[in-house]
Image: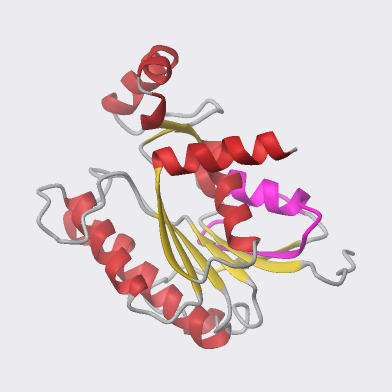
């Protein structure tokens, strides 16, 4: 059993069965400043850890059932999402916008002082003018979250996220990017980021003090943040 130490944080991670959320979970469980990690998702994680509180929740259109689990939390890392083309346009919007806003609403009600980090994406368009559904819907979610009263709110907009661990790629574009990643990273370093690095960055930012208000981190900003952290070690 994990015994909390003064100053340790309680963290919620949504989407921990996914690529970025999975790395965020592993990092948070091993982090000495984290006392408890509540992982909320639709599928079992298949792991156990003294710091882990796993909550299964299948309908993110209504998060009232997990209100108790979201009480007295210090922060949340929200990585729930899907790939364009994997679902219908209607479902893409539901997952990207509606699920995000509903979760944030309940979290803010039960933990009004919590920090919130949202996994958005490169090209997210808050103006709603983009022809790309992914960009429009991520922009809509960002707008809705900015309108909420989170004391600390962070948007992460990574470009290509390198999977690090082998996986079945969702489409041809991802298979191609994985194949050319070594060269792509050298030529366009600010357009790529490793999934494990992104997960760690989201946890670190969510747990730290200060930075009141909302902040947007583009891919270049995330890389600078990681480089600064490694230099400080």
Q: Which span is picked out in magenta?
A: 22-48
In the displayed structure, 103 sits above or below 165; it is below
Quadrant the N terminus occupies? bottom right
> Image check: 158 left or right of 40?
left
Q: Position of residue 27 (x, y in %)?
A: 69, 47
Viewer-proximal residue, 49 or 35?
35
Q: Residue at x 87, y 64 (%)?
A: 2
Residue 107 visible = yes
Q: Residue at x 28, y 69 (%)?
A: 143
Q: Identify the image's colour scheme: rainbow, by chain, secondary structure or one colour.
A: secondary structure
> Image check: 162 left or right of 48?
left
In the displayed structure, 189 sits above or below 222; it is above
Q: Residue at x 36, y 69 (%)?
A: 99
Q: Position of residue 126 (x, y in %)?
A: 22, 61
Question: Which residue is most to the bottom?
Answer: 109
Viewer-proximal residue, 185 or 49?
185
122 drawn magenta: no
Residue 169 visible = no
Quadrant the C terminus occupies? top right
Q: Position of residue 51 (x, y in %)?
A: 78, 61
Q: Residue at x 48, y 84 (%)?
A: 64
> Image check: 121 left or right of 114?
left
The quadrant where residue 33 appears: bottom right
Viewer-proximal residue, 149 or 131?
149
The quadrant where residue 192 appears: top left
29 drawn magenta: yes
């Amino acid at each position: 059993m994990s015994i909390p130490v003064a100053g340790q944080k309680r963290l919620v991670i949504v989407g921990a069965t996914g690529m970025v959320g999975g790395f965020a979970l592993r990092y948070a469980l091993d982090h000495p400043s984290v006392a408890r990690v509540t992982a909320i998702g639709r599928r079992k994680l298949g792991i156990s850890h003294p710091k882990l509180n796993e909550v299964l929740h299948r309908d993110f259109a209504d998060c009232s059932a997990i209100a108790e689990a979201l009480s007295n939390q210090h922060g949340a890392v929200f990585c729930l999402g899907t790939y364009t083309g994997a679902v219908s346009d209607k479902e893409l919007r539901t997952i990207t916008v509606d699920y995000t806003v509903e979760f944030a609403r309940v979290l803010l009600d039960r933990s009004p002082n919590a920090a919130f980090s949202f996994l958005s994406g490169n090209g997210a368009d808050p103006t709603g003018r983009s022809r790309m559904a992914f960009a429009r819907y991520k922009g809509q979610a960002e707008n809705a979250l900015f309108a909420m009263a989170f004391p600390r709110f962070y948007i992460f907009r990574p470009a290509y996220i390198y999977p690090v661990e082998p996986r079945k790629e969702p489409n041809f574009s991802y298979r191609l990017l994985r194949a050319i990643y070594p060269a792509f990273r050298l030529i366009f370093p600010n357009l790529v980021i490793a999934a494990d690095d992104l997960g760690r960055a989201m946890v670190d930012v969510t747990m730290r003090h200060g930075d009141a208000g909302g902040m947007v981190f583009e891919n270049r900003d995330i890389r600078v943040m990681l480089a600064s952290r490694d230099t400080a070690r």
